[in-house]
Image (cartoon, coloured by chain):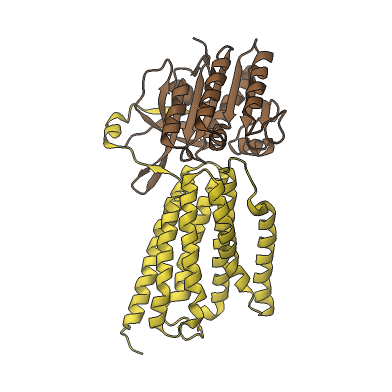
Chain colours: A brown, B yellow
Amino acid sequence: MRLASSGVPALDKLLADGYPDKSAILVLGPPGIGKEAIGYWFTKTGLVQGDFCLYATRLPVREVLQDVKGFGIDMDHKVPLWLSSDGGQIKYDVNDLAGLSHSIKEVLKQNGGRRIRIVMDVLSSLLMLNQSDTIYKFLDQLLADAKQYDAVVLATLEEGMHKPEIVTAMQQLFDGVLELKLYEEGLRVLPLLRIRKMRGVPPQPGYYSFSFSRNGMELSSYVK
Amino acid sequence: MSSSISIADAALIAEIAIIVALAVYGGYRALTIRHALYSRAYRNQALAAAVAFLALAFLAFTNLAPGSYASGNPTGLFYYIGPIFVAAIYSAFFYMVDVTARAGRFSDPLLRDTLHWSQARKVLWALNILCIVLTFVTGIFLLLFTFFLPIVSGALLFPVLARRTGDMTLRRHMRWLGGFFVLFFLSVFFYPNVATDAELVIDGLPLVMGALFLTISARSLAPLNRISAIEKSLTAPTTAVGSVPK
């Protein structure tokens, strides 16, 4: 099976070399914990390897690039195709689901001969502004379409913004779920990562503490 | 000079002790949450909470220290450093409103600039600094602007932000922070009527309650979870996984 590197060697090691081929991965966590960074490294690695990368965001591109720099990632030379509300090659309109779906399908068609990486940092805003059933069907169709190609989709979802049943339903659509959460331990607050599920990887009950620095992402098994 | 302290003085010291203890706990809490976050907007929000706790501890000393203001004529060190503290404390609270507004924008699915805050904040910070400088240069007391700035801007911003944000945690944080500002207003606004230490004790009660509200708001900076005992038994696999070069 061909795997797509996550761009984080420590995470690749946990995933037995990367995300599964033709898969959809969900990164779940509260605002501010660094979910987007996992998308940035995934994109950066794809660009380096010559994959076609699409980055869908509700933020203006300049704000994303600032954030990317904050994590010490250099995206000055090679950039993804931006699908954004401001500054992207493709315009993102949160109220136009059909347009969003059409744009992504066009990108898939035009780059059918290559490995494609799609990062979707728009899922929470879509869920907040539309009926959850509508988004569920939209995403189900979109992920099925993406799997017709050599594509890996990575989406982020905000914890604490949606009802638990909606989050659970969303998780079922994805082949892999990475969960980033803050845990209290006495007076300490720890950011921990857990692989809730991953196609082709046996269930892993362990938690991993993680940190970001300008040198990258570090992971270590959490031992109480 | 009598070595014994009155009941009112003891009560005031107790109030200060409670506020300082809550400020230390809340400030530490805010900094640990900041340490665990990586997005600049949310890190700034946690930092602002820690700064607000520091300001609150100072507020307790400047407003509640026995004898310092009870007569309406502050003496000694308070006479000189009081206005500096007042300006710094009120500005710290405004900083908290400012960063909360910016974090609120990120959790709005439509990324709306509530009340044109990105522009308004620059004007308000400039006016705030101008008022502080003029107060010290001319002697005309203009710190009322600095005092009302966080209260009025919070009262205008928080209800709109709470409606627009999808983040339940931020909504809870703003609710408790709003409660703190109401109590802060009550405590400071009625302060000139205080003539004795006994009245000062009563005046200090809203501030003690406010400290509690601010502490709860700091706990609501991010959703915190606990690992269950069952999960703990399944945890702790092997050794460090490794790190990544840039």
Quarter of the image with the C terminus of chain B is: top right
Q: Nearer the viewer, residue A20 or A143?
A: A143
Task: Please state which of residues B197 and B51 is positioned toward the viewer in this rendering.
Answer: B197
Q: In front: A40, or B225? A: B225
Q: Position of residue A190 (x, y in %)?
A: 41, 41
What x and y, as percent, mark residue A175? 46, 20
Question: Residue B84, percent across and down?
Answer: 57, 72
Asked if A59 appears above or below B178 in the picture, the reply is above
Q: Nearer the viewer, residue B166 or B41?
A: B166
Asked which quadrant contains residue B203, the reply is bottom left
Tell me which residue sits at (60%, 65%) in the image: B149
Quarter the N terminus of chain B occupies: bottom left
B84 left or right of B191 in image: right
A43 is higher (above) or lower (below) than A163: above
Quadrant hosting residue A102: top right
Res B209 seen here: yes
| Residue located at (41% from left, 81% from top) | B199
Q: Work out whether A201 lies above or below B61.
A: above
